[in-house]
Amino acid sequence: MKTNPTKPKPAPSKVRPAKAKSDAFVLRLYVAGQTPKSMAAFANLKKICEEHLAGQYQIEVIDLLENPHLARGDQILAIPTLVKKLPPPVRKIIGDLSNTERVLIGLDLLPRE
Amino acid sequence: MAKPRKQLPKAPTGIQGLDEITGGGLPKGRPTLICGGPGCGKTLFAMEFLVRGARQFNEPGVFMAFEETAKDLTQNMASLGFDLKDMIARKKMVLDFVYIERSEIEVTGEYDLEGLFIRLGQAIDSIGAKRVVLDTIESLFSGLPNPLIVRSELRRLFRWLKDKGVTAVITGERGEKTLTRQGMEEYVSDCVIVLDHRVSEQVPSRRLRVVKYRGSTHGTNEYPFLIDEDGILVLPVTSLGLQNIASTDRIPTGIARLDTMLGGAGYYRGSSVLVSGTAGTGKTSFAAHFAEAACRRGERVLYFAFEESPSQIMRNMRSIGIDLEPWVQKGLLRFQANRPSFAGMEMHLTMIHKAVNAFKPQVVIMDPLSSFVIGGNEIEVKAMLMRLVDFLKMNQITGLFTNLTSGRGAVEITDVAISSLIDTWLLLRDIEIGGERNRGLYLLKSRGMAHSNQIREFLLTDHGVELFDVYVGPEGVLTGSARQAQEAQEQAGKLMRKQDIERRHLELERKRKALEAQIAAMRAEFEAEEVEALKIIGQEKAMEKQLTQERVDMGLSRKADK
């Protein structure tokens, strides 16, 4: 899986905090160019991860404008989409991730009501 | 048809019949909505559009499936002879299954469907696709929350597809009050086609209707269509109008005296002939005569039997001296026997179409039409017959239909529904006189020829149908043994008259002979008298002579001086 090292700009594509020994959470964020929604999603995601998963997560950002063929593999329709590859089960979270609670539910960090 | 005006560019579907209805296909470079209930054939329609596009028109296509997986689709289409795997391998098609599972998706905040656009765009670009199918895109509404976003994104998608210049087919499930559940018809406004699968009288039938076609004329009827092993087949026959060329060629009926009744030459080629009558009047025999006569001329005959099996027909016809079997063996006569109830009217019509197109007959016989009438569907039967007659006429095929009329007296009324389609109408009926049923033949009409107005009686003999003049005289119309008795009576009368004349002749002769005998007798008598008289006269004369002599002698003896 190719990753994009430059976009979105404000952050490197792989955020791998130093203290991470094992990447318990493998997250993939699909975006299409640097749209405000994508930027917001990335910022929100980073914030949530830092707060709740510090040291045990890995984020890949995939820009479909550059790698359109990757959309098929993860069944991406909506942008932005966050795919939780690990731990299973695979989950998708669609949107700009502005609702922290729903993101945590999506990551199975909070129980579903 | 008016002068062909410049219409929208169209993308031919290659689906038989549909391109005729739409005047060339779907609007090129625009989206078309196909909607209908479950199992109406939407997916097949869409897939056939792509497959035929790629195969026949060299337009590769992208099939984006939202409901069936690529594997399922490939398997389903293989049963129709569409080898999707091969087409994908040859880059004629991209099959993309879009998987949406609501339970696996969490939504937080705003999103768009750019991913779908990118995916579709990538698929289109990878093979240079000209056609796109989205089947069934409405699944997005159930798979994704926030229908407002989906709605606006779809609107954008259709615009985007138009900009891409691809001809798109979008399928949609029929809704309660709208054409589709999510009102897709609002977005896809260029062409909307509704498919329908309904069951009436336990017989299913599929219909197709072009509800809307912007910028183009199109047939607006509900057209029956069929899904068979070759895919979809739409029957647009009613759109053809009355354009057929009437032939002046005449073909014999197979019954010499019937030809004479029909202006001496038989039916017109390409005309439609109806033989109607009550049960057991010999309709099939007339059909068989016609079939045999056509085969004798070396023409091909397609015989649709709806009540009897081919072998039964052949056996029965052999009993009246018509042997059809050799023609079947020679391949000039083909039987196709089906129960009318086995399929819907359209299915039958379509099968007839297919059979006619495959066999290319000059004569088509349908025996009998009436078995299609199941509980008040005469209108449908008429519609079917109309299409059939049109179709046959277009192909210059002579059609002979038999029709069972029920009951007495109403024969002409029950047939009115189809009579206007018929060119030559023979009515066979029972004539009941003197405790007998005899068969009578009327020529109710025969367009475009001087035909006999007389009733004929006909007999089914061991050498076929034979027509007789019925006895028409002071006693009324007589048939059967009454006719024969009348004929015998006339014969006897004639004989008596003849004998009478002979007798008179003899009498006269006898009288003449008597007269002549009388004359001879009288003459003999006269002759006898004459002889007697002459004898007496001779004696008298001799006596006188003697007297004179005696006197001279006496004078001499007296020596008289004077």
Image (tube, grey):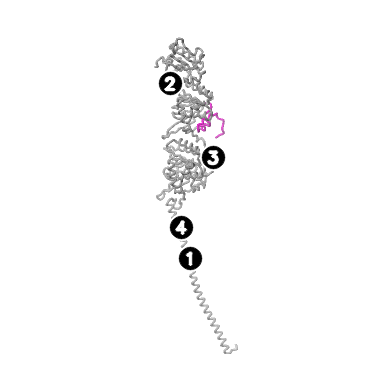
Q: Chain of mark 1?
A: B
Above-or-below relation of B293 to B180: below
Residue B102's label in the rendered image is 2
Foreground mark, 2 or 1?
Answer: 2
**Which of disc 1 and disc 2 is earlier in sequence?**
2
Most foreground residue, B465 or B8? B465
Residue beneath label 3, please?
Answer: B245
Q: Amino acid at mark 3?
A: Ile
Q: Chain of mark 3?
A: B
Task: Check if mark 2 and mark 4 are on a common chain.
Answer: yes
Q: Which residues are magenta?
A: B1-30
**Which of disc 4 and disc 2 is earlier in sequence?**
2
**Which of disc 3 and disc 1 is earlier in sequence?**
3
Residue beneath label 4, please?
Answer: B494
**Which of disc 3 and disc 2 is earlier in sequence?**
2
Q: Amino acid at mark 4?
A: Lys
Above-or-below relation of B235 to B69: below
| Prevailing secondary structure of the magenta residues | loop
Residue beneath label 1, please?
Answer: B509
Task: Check if mark 2 and mark 1 are on a common chain.
Answer: yes
Above-or-below relation of A108 to B297: above
Asked whether residue A83 is in view, the answer is yes
Q: CA gap, disc 2 to disc 4?
A: 102 Å
Q: CA gap, disc 2 to disc 3?
A: 61 Å
Q: Position of residue B145 (x, y in %)?
A: 44, 20
Q: CA gap, disc 1 to disc 3?
A: 72 Å
Do callouts 4 and 3 mark residues in contact (Cβ within 8 Å)? no
